[in-house]
Amino acid sequence: MALSVFTVVFSGILGACLGSFANVLAVRWHEMGAPVGRSRCPLCRKTIRPKHLVPIFSYLILRGRCADCKAKIHIQYPLVELAVAILSVVAALRHNPLGSDFPAFAVELALVTLLAAIVVMDLRWKELPVEIMALIGFSALIVHVFAGSSFDIRHSIFELRNLVLAVALPLVFFGAQWLLSRGKWLGGGDVWFGVMMGLVLGNWQMTALAIYISYLAGGCAAAILLMTKILKRGANLPFAPFLALGLMLTVWFGISIQAWIAKFIF
Ligand SMILES: [Zn+2]
């Protein structure tokens, strides 16, 4: 689908702003007791001026340093803003935000924004916010019930039995690993991430595919990081980034992959 320049700019800016929101959500959620309100520099505690809150550009203009005390700004901020901006353009490519497809665009954008916050929290602090995952799962359930097929899993009709299997699969598969390893292979948060995946995809075949992709990507990344000695043997690799990758790749390409596999089986 061809996209107008306006749509790309509109969705890109919207995505960058939502990326900025994901950053704030992750940091504030981690700090918990931190006051709600204006953003401050974590070092000098000075309130950040509005002109320095522009996603991506402020980081570049300030050369990655606080305008007051010159402390380094965490690379998380521009990276997440850029990532969500790109994901927003991808969502616009799949669902025209300026047409009747806007609800599907908004749902996908909300999903990638909240996933970005979860991935940041797992990468930086090894924390998985169960409440945010519950929010995504519950919202997905509502979308499934009222919209049926907004996640572009267009050909699979939403069924209760399939949804129960989609939730049971990660719950049993991840839950068993968590119990057997006493939380060493997988954290309890990863089990809930799996359940959320099942709720979002609403289909057990798609959930199995998403889990498979997550393990494949995680395994490849672990092998590369071990060989290059970036990751030390016995150290834990955060799993949420790979689960999020598996989930989004399945949302985007699940139906095509399923059709491709079916060609070999039948
Ligand atoms: Zn400062």
Image: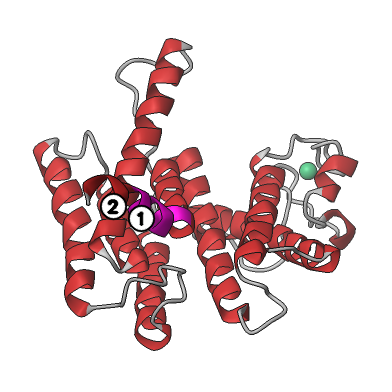
Residue type indicated by callout 2 = Ala
Q: How is the image coloured?
A: secondary structure
Q: Quadrant of residue 8?
A: bottom right
Observer-nearest of 7 and 23? 7
Please report the residue visible at 69 percent of the width from the left and 81 percent of the height from the top: 99
Place of residue 54 in the rendered image (x, y in percent of width and height, measured from the top left) = 82, 57
Q: Quadrant of residue 65?
A: top right
Q: Could you classify mark 1 by the number of other residues whose Cα lies within 10 Å: few (under 14), some (14-19), or many (20 or more)?
A: few
Disc assigned to residue 259: 1
Q: Which residue is mark 2?
A: 262
Vertical placement of 200 versus 49: above or below?
below
| Magenta segment boundaries in residue numbering | 253-260
**Is 233 contained in the magenta span?**
no
Observer-nearest of 251 and 28? 251
- Looking at the image, do the residues carrying marks 1 and 2 touch, with CB atoms under 8 Å apart? yes
Q: Residue furthest bottom?
A: 146
Please report the residue visible at 57 percent of the width from the left and 80 percent of the height from the top: 103
Element type where label 2 sits in the image: helix
Disc assigned to residue 85: none
Mark 1 vs mark 2, CA separation in Å:
5 Å
Residue type indicated by callout 1 = Ala
Please report the residue visible at 73 percent of the width from the left and 48 percent of the height from the top: 41
**Is 257 contained in the magenta span?**
yes
